[in-house]
Amino acid sequence: MEELYLGCHVSFHRQTQLLGSVKEALSYGANTFMFYISSPQNTTRYPIDLENQKEAIAFMKTHKIDPSKVVVHAPYIINLATLKNREFMINFLKEECKRVQAYGMTKLVLHPGSHVGLGKQKGIQNIIEALNEVLKEPTSVVILLETMAGKGTEIGTIEEVIEIIKNVEKKENIGICLDTCHLHDAGYSLTYFSSVLNLIETSIGLEKIGCIHVNDSKNEKGSHKDRHENFGFGTIGFSVLEEIVYHPKLKNVPKILETPYVSVNDEEKKRSFPPYKFEIEMIKKKKKNQNLIEDIRKFYTS
């Protein structure tokens, strides 16, 4: 039986670093995970705790987590589509690739960027040129361009990502990350997911799919809003997402949940809790838990 690589976004703290991330993922029943090296909103980076990293890799081996299936996400503020702070962005991404490699991982998800008025073709060309510059240095890291919902001047339709990948010189270091919420909000019909895969397969090959973010959406198809919903509780729906997770052509691709935390109002304050333990359990059982949100609230507040 083929392994299902199913995980979620986990935290990364300065003190506990990678080992803390691994332990959090395991607490949810995940066998892979995604993390940001520090905050996704800035480029501040802490020194790598080499002892922690060594212990984390050994811990992953013990618990059968394959580092090649673990995903690192680059910070949101990297924008290769514009010319603003271009040299800094390119140099930072080069260093981020080195950090990913130092942690023992090979997958780095990157938002392609926004052209902020330059026009899509100019933005796409800027991304291609920047990635070619970044990848001049030898690396084992594969940069996975994430499909986007199309907010504002975002670049990131499947067709745009394909165009970028086709023009990046080091093909072995570039790939695609599909985000189901983003695809849906961009206007793709996931009910006919085979057509999405066919587009990728006939242009760059399915082997270029390095990660899938399996998120439901709060929005109608084509809204271009990008608001994630818990698995099976949005406008995409459980059966469609389940089909993607278990698609036979995507067996070896890690599936990562980035679904919203569940809010709880109590007498003290409003708190939010991760849904991943319950969503992963539900996905493995292949049956929607209609009481998912309430079960999460009870678990964390009882």
Image (spheres, rainbow, N blue to C red):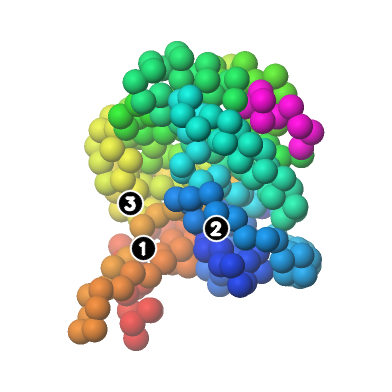
Q: In the image, is 88 to the left or to the right of 273?
A: right
Residue shown at 76%/37% (left/top)? 139
> Residue tagged by mark 3?
229
> Residue tagged by mark 1?
261
What label sits on residue 102 in the rendered view? none
Q: Is mark 2 on a helix, strand or loop?
A: loop
Residues marked 3 and 1 touching at CB (< 8 Å): no
Residue shown at 48%/24% (left/top)? 83
Question: Earlier along the polypeptide chain: callout 3 or callout 1?
Answer: 3
Q: Where's the C terminus, which quadrant?
A: bottom left
Local crowd at mark 1 within 10 Å, few (<14), some, or many (≥20)?
some
Residue 138 within the segment the image draws in magenta: yes
Which-is-in-front pick, marks 2 and 3?
A: 2
Local crowd at mark 2 within 10 Å, few (<14), some, or many (≥20)?
some
Residues marked 2 and 3 touching at CB (< 8 Å): no
> Residue tagged by mark 2?
38
Name the kind of residue labelled 3 in the image: Glu
Task: Measure the C-alpha gap from mark 3 to mark 1.
Answer: 9 Å
Question: Earlier along the polypeptide chain: callout 2 or callout 3?
Answer: 2
